[in-house]
Amino acid sequence: MSNPFSYAGKRVVVTGAATGVGAALLELLAEIGAPQVTVVDIKPPSGPHTRFVEANLSDEAAVTDVIAALDGPVDVLFNNAGVAATQPPRVVLAVNYLALRRLSEGLLERIPSGGAIVNTASIAGVRWPEHVTEINQLLDLGDWDASLDWVDENLEAMGGDSYSFSKEVVRVWGMRHSRVTGARGVRTNSVCPAPIDTPLLNDFKATMGEAIIQWTAEQATGALMTPREVAMPLAFLGSEAAAYVNGHDLIADGGFNAAMTTGQVDFSGLA
């Protein structure tokens, strides 16, 4: 009987794999089948990979070039690249949402039935139900520049945090796109991690505040997530073990949201 968690013989694309979660994912994939992995990033990865395609994913033309440069079938697309709100809002939305969408739509015809698209979202996108009407308006635009113009005009009304809003958009887009991909036998899912101990953590401390990040970790397991702890659910959703999982946000936060929902968090640490 074959191992449904194995990536043996797969062709995989991972964006944002030079450091952090993406780097951990490369190491994990090498352990669970050593697939052919193409990395798309602005700088080369050090982890196991077959091919590197350099690209600035905030640039529409560069994303189009990536799609053209990737040949053959793609069994699993991991949209992992992301930037924090230390970057300008247009860059944040371009990398975190628009590039992810463009790659997913542009490569869909090359993903065979049984394949998967897995997005790295975040628990920072928790407010998407409050903004779902506006997010759907943004998603309906589709056009790269028109979408960024919409963000310029509406971000403050969406809370003003470009990173959190970008992850709200990713979560809603993933649910919408799962209907399209599901009709082709391709699954689209997201992992929503808590704060992660990666090189980007200092950027999140600068934009969100160190206190809120530390408090979130304390109210979960008491520690920040490791990159590998995010890579594992990503790999699960991309594997055949998740064959009937589609349109799902897998919350990987050590129980933080469960505690919030049931009124079991201690807010005194934020005082």
Image (cartoon, rainbow, N blue to C red):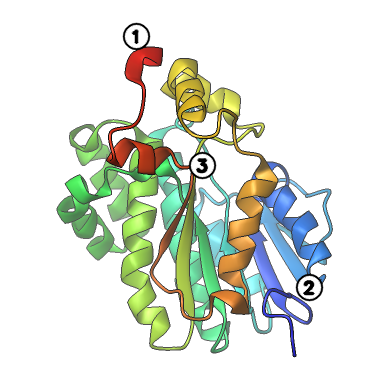
Q: Which type of secondary structure does the marked residue at label 2 adopt?
A: strand
Quadrant, the N terminus: bottom right
- Is 138 positioned to the left or the right of 243 in the image? left
Mark linked to residue 80: none
Q: Is residue 55 visible?
A: no
- Is 227 positioned to the left or the right of 252 in the image? right
| Amino acid residing under circle 3 | Gly
Residue 48 percent coordinates (x, y): 84, 58
Q: Is the residue 73 above or below the residue 219 in the image?
A: below
Q: Residue at x 31, y 69 (%)?
A: 176
Residue 81 percent coordinates (x, y): 57, 50
Q: Which type of secondary structure does the marked residue at label 1 adopt?
A: loop
> Given the current orientation, which residue lies at the most extreme top position?
271
Camera-side residue: 168 or 68? 168
Q: Residues within 10 Å of mark 1 (few under 14, many from 20)?
A: few
Q: Is the residue 13 above or below the residue 271 in the image?
A: below
- Is 183 positioned to the left or the right of 68 in the image? left
Give the CA separation, mark 3 to mark 2. 31 Å
Q: Are marks 3 and 1 in contact (CB under 8 Å)?
A: no
Residue 33 percent coordinates (x, y): 80, 72
Q: Residues within 10 Å of mark 3 (few under 14, many from 20)?
A: many
Q: Which residue is mark 1?
A: 271
> Given the current orientation, which residue lies at the most extreme left position?
133
Quadrant, the C terminus: top left
Q: Residue at x 33, y 52 (%)?
A: 169
| Amino acid residing under circle 2 | Gln
| Amino acid residing under circle 1 | Ala
Q: Which residue is mark 3?
A: 254
Mark linked to residue 36: 2
First in sequence: mark 1 or mark 2?
2
- Is 101 positioned to the left or the right of 23 in the image? left
Give the CA separation, mark 3 to mark 1. 22 Å
